[in-house]
């Protein structure tokens, strides 16, 4: 199978500080990969390479090569809008816009020039169904998104990301702000979504990584320590640091 | 879904247009300020010299200096601050340190905001009615100072409150845990840390007081009084009122124009110095706090 | 023992602090009491100066004339009693200024000792006469009829257009022109200041790089610090002549000049408050928008501005409040004609400017003096309302972001 995302010796600097050191990982399509590691290890920074969200920070320098679907995304003439359309993102805290539920999901379409109401309706419904939220909100699409519970808000944010038909979804600790029941729903959803999307998820929660991911990469202070199939890595870590982390000796 | 190049070009063009409009509008704002400042500095600078600052006005205020107006304004600044600083700082402390998020706190805040929103001319009316007529202070420094003091009180209260709020609670808890009383904690820990911001607020309110005209129109300001005050019950001239008088209703408006430019420059210079001082202080203390 | 003193001391300090915190409330209560005590006095008085009265022939069926009718009669806009509901009889004006037209000096007497008799005779002889005379002359033996004048009412005060507080025989206290003048100038100011202010705040919060922002921020603060007389002075020597030349007007002191000056003055309020509001937008929300392929402008227009709309509204309202209450600058540049404005190129007069211009000349305790306090009350009520609206708007629960 062809790799959908590849990174080759990627390093990232905030001014002088090196946040990522020569990271090389390849991702297979329709898989879930978990990035784990203690706070500040660079896993979120690494995730944000794929939709170039690090560009928003001043004084960031990136070396190495990142390709998505075979294209080097740090090429000069890269179309960032198209890239971000292809690579959806879900954030740590649910962050719906101050708009109605419908408009939240339609947002990505509207800002990219889709204003045909019938198209919008169709895609909103499709996305909400995919994120398992449709039945809960179908009667109140015009209501403010803030009236939803935290877990529902997060699924709305997933629907919002799905609406523009990405092939990859980045999740930055998507359940860390949620209660256990909502977390379970999100995890179930991730499992479902795997059929159609490639998912990269950053998580603090090792059990979660174990439950939802096919592959796991362990980061420590900007370095990739170990990567592999999740089961293998959890049962039989090759590196002592990985072993210490997953057995809870630091983190 | 494929986003067409046209859509992207279109939205990036819109962004460019919008941001350029913002740039142009901001430039207009900056330019109008620069225009006002440079106009007054350009016309006023040649008028200002030692005599202008230290002489009495002469010949129906078309010649001579503005010394009594400078002294008058300084008196009013001092008088209003003697009133506003202690009361403002005390209320700020009370609101931030002693009240919980209670009805009283919200009520006081509402009242402070309302007081801040009252137009200055209404303060003038009130000051005339209470201090000048009812308390029989007459047109006097004390009546003017109290009126101005009341007007800037909300500024002092708010800055004090904000300054205290920015002191992290851990410092309070740390001090209390060592057995210090609440008052000791406030005096020895909280106030010193909030001090720079409180001072900055006070300096800015000095700038505000020195430029106000409407509140002093009927409480203290003298049209023409070429002598210095000898007590707090005397009238005085004041810079802003003097500028108003010689630019609109003086005996000879054309001839007193240079004096008007000079007065305007002195007023602006005062505000400028006050602003710079506040900024410098903020920076100075900012560094000092960081070093510790 | 020491402990006892210590805690008593703390109590005393706390008490002092508490008392200080009550001063703002006390001040507002006092302002209300003093303002309204004088202001409401307006409505207990007859518009005719104390010590004077209007008299007519005792057979004249008219018993009462309103302030406006009196003015029209004495301005000779009304010349027949029929117009005010009386007999068909032309009106003869009689007052002490033109007494020599009616009686010779000797007839009046050296010390006016015969004056009361003269007035009495004259009113008796002529059925159409209306005389404005001191009450000293209408005492015992007076044969005419003394007219009553209705007291000034609040509705009249607010709805009438004519503001001639020192007019004789009856003061005209209609503030409609002043209220409209205030709103007119403020409206113009906000039309100028709102787009400029909002654009600048958006530029500072969303577009400018930190260096430019660090340059703009103190500049805006400085703009806020410049005294209003200086703005007024600048308006007087630059904007007023400019407008006069540009539109080829007889005078440049116009509503437009006031609006421009006020607009510049309202800028710092609008910029600072709306920038603060824009900055409260959570970073995560902006990132989410960018991650969906929106560009910076789309993010600003569709996410940041809606999110901070309550703060932006508050900024706009406070800007209006600042414009409505501003006194000196307006006084210096608007020309102060107490007429209802029809265009921006006419002189207007605002409430604060009226108070500032006239209070010095109004005798303390007189009707004019009280009427100016009543104007102050109107201003107070308007700004209080604005404050409460702002309080409500900015406390209105923002979309809960959990």
Image: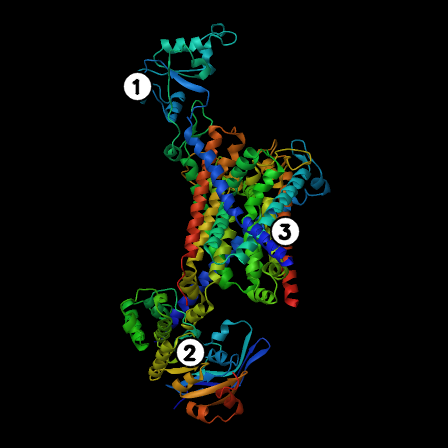
The answer for which chain carries disc 3 is B
Q: Is residue B27 visible?
A: yes
Q: How crowded is mark 3: few (under 14 residues within 10 Å), some or many (20 or more)?
A: many
* Residue sitting nearer the eye, C115 or C256: C115
Tags 2 and 3 in contact by the CB under 8 Å rule? no
Distance from disc 3 to disc 1, alpha carbons, whole Å, reads 68 Å
Q: In which quarter of the image is the N terminus of chain A?
A: bottom left
Residue lying at 65% horizontally and 31% vertically, measured from the top left: B60
Image spot of residue C282 (x, y percent)? 46, 66
Residue on which the image places disc 2: A171
Q: Is residue C145 placed above or below C47 in the rendered structure? A: above
Kindly state the secondary structure of the residue where label 3 is placed.
helix
Kindly state the secondary structure of the residue where label 1 is placed.
loop
Q: How many marks?
A: 3
The reply, left or right, for residue B175 in relation to residue C240 is: right
Residue lying at 52% horizontally and 38% vertically, measured from the top left: B126
Q: Is residue C40 placed above or below A139 in the rendered structure? A: above
* Residue sitting nearer the eye, B137 or C379: B137
Residue on which the image places disc 3: B274
Tags 3 and 1 in contact by the CB under 8 Å rule? no
Residue on which the image places disc 1: C86
Q: Which residue lies furthest to the front in this view?
A: C1
The answer for which chain carries disc 2 is A
Distance from disc 1 to disc 2, alpha carbons, whole Å, reads 90 Å
Distance from disc 2 to disc 3, alpha carbons, whole Å, reads 51 Å
* Colour theme: rainbow
The answer for which chain carries disc 1 is C
Residues flagged by tags 3 and 1 on a common chain: no
Q: Is residue C216 visible?
A: no
Q: Residues within 10 Å of mark 1 (few under 14, many from 20)?
A: some
């Amino acid at each position: 199978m062809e790799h959908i995302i590849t990174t080759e010796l990627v390093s990232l600097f905030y001014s002088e500080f090196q946040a990522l050191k020569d990271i090389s990982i390849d991702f297979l399509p329709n898989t879930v990969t978990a990035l784990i590691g203690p706070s500040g290890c660079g896993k979120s920074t690494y995730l944000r390479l794929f939709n170039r969200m690090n560009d928003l920070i001043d004084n960031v320098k990136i070396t190495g090569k990142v390709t998505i679907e075979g294209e080097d995304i740090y090429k000069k003439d890269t179309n960032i809008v198209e890239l971000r359309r292809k690579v959806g993102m879900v954030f740590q805290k649910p962050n719906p816009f101050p708009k109605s539920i419908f408009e939240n999901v339609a947002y990505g379409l509207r800002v990219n020039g889709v204003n045909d109401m019938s198209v919008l309706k169709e895609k909103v419904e499709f996305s909400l169904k995919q994120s398992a939220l449709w039945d809960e909100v179908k009667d109140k699409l015009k209501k403010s998104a803030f009236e939803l519970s935290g877990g529902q808000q997060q699924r709305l944010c997933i629907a919002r990301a799905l609406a523009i038909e990405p092939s990859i979804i980045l999740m930055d600790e998507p359940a860390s702000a949620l209660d256990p029941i909502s977390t379970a729903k999100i995890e179930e959803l991730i499992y479902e979504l795997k059929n159609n999307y490639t998912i990269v998820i950053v998580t603090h929660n090792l059990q979660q990584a174990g439950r939802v991911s096919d592959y796991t990469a362990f980061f420590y202070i900007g370095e990739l320590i170990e990567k592999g199939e999740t089961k293998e890595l959890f049962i039989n870590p090759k590196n002592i640091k990985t072993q210490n982390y997953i057995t809870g000796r630091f983190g | 879904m494929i986003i067409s190049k046209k859509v992207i070009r279109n939205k990036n063009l819109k962004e460019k247009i919008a941001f350029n409009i913002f740039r142009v509008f901001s430039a207009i704002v900056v330019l109008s300020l620069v225009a006002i400042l440079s106009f007054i500095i350009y016309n006023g600078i040649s008028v200002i010299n030692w005599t202008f600052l230290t002489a009495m006005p002469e010949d129906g205020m078309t010649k001579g200096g503005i010394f009594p107006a400078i002294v008058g304004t300084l008196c009013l600044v001092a008088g209003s601050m003697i009133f506003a600083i202690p009361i403002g700082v005390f209320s700020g402390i009370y609101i931030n340190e002693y009240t919980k998020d209670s009805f009283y706190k919200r009520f006081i805040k509402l009242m402070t905001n309302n007081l801040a929103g009252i137009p200055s001319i209404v303060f003038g009316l009130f000051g005339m009615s209470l201090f000048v007529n009812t308390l029989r202070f007459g047109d006097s420094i004390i009546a003017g100072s109290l009126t101005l003091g009341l007007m800037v009180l909300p500024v002092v209260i708010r800055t004090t409150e904000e300054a205290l709020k920015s002191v992290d609670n851990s410092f309070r808890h740390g001090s209390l845990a060592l057995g210090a009383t609440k008052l000791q904690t406030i005096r020895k820990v909280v106030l010193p840390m909030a001090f720079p911001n409180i001072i900055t607020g006070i300096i800015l309110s000095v700038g505000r007081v020195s430029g106000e005209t409407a509140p002093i129109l009927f409480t203290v300001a003298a049209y023409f009084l070429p002598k210095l005050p000898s007590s707090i019950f005397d009238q005085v001239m004041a810079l802003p009122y003097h500028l108003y008088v010689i630019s609109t209703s003086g005996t000879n408006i054309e001839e007193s124009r240079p004096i008007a430019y000079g007065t305007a420059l002195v007023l602006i210079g005062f505000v400028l110095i006050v602003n710079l001082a506040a900024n410098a202080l903020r920076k100075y203390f900012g560094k000092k706090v960081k070093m510790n | 023992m020491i402990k006892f003193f210590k805690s008593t001391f703390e109590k005393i300090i706390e008490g002092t602090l508490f008392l200080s915190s009550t001063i703002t409330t006390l001040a507002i209560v006092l302002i209300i009491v003093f303002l309204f005590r004088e202001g409401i006095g307006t409505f207990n008085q007859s518009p005719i100066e104390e010590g004077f009265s209007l008299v007519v022939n005792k057979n004249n069926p008219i018993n009462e004339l309103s302030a406006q009718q009196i003015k029209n009669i004495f301005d000779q806009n009304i010349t027949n009693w029929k117009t005010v509901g009386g007999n068909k009889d032309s009106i003869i004006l009689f007052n002490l200024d033109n007494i020599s037209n009616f009686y010779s000096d000797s007839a009046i007497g050296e010390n006016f000792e015969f004056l009361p008799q003269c007035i009495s005779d004259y009113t008796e002889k002529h059925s159409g006469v209306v005389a404005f005379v001191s009450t000293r002359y209408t005492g015992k033996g007076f044969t005419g009829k003394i007219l009553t004048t209705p007291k000034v009412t609040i509705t009249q005060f607010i709805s009438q257009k004519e503001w001639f507080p020192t007019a004789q025989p009856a003061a005209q206290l209609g503030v409609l022109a002043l209220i409209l003048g205030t709103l007119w100038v403020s409206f113009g100011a906000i039309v100028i200041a709102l787009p400029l202010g909002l654009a600048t705040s958006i530029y500072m919060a969303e577009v400018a790089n930190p260096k430019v922002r660090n340059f703009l921020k103190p500049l805006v603060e400085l703009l806020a610090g410049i005294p209003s007389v200086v703005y007024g002075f600048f308006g007087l020597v630059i904007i007023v002549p400019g407008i006069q030349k540009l539109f080829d007007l007889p005078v440049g002191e116009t509503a437009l000049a006031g609006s421009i000056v006020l607009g510049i003055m309202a800028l710092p309020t609008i910029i600072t408050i709306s920038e603060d509001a824009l900055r409260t937008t959570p970073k995560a929300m902006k990132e989410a928008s960018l991650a969906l392929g929106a560009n910076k402008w789309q993010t600003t227009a569709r996410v940041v501005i809606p999110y901070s709309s309550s703060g932006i509204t508050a900024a706009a309202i406070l800007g209006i409040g600042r414009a409505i209450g501003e006194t000196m600058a307006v006084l210096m540049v608007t020309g102060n004609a107490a007429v209802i404005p029809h265009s921006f190129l006419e002189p207007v007069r605002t409430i604060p400017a009226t108070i500032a211009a006239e209070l010095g000349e109004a005798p303390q305790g007189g009707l004019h003096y009280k009427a100016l306090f009543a104007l102050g009350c109107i201003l107070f009520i308007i700004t209080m309302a604005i404050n409460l609206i702002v309080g409500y708007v900015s406390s209105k629960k923002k979309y809960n972001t959990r």
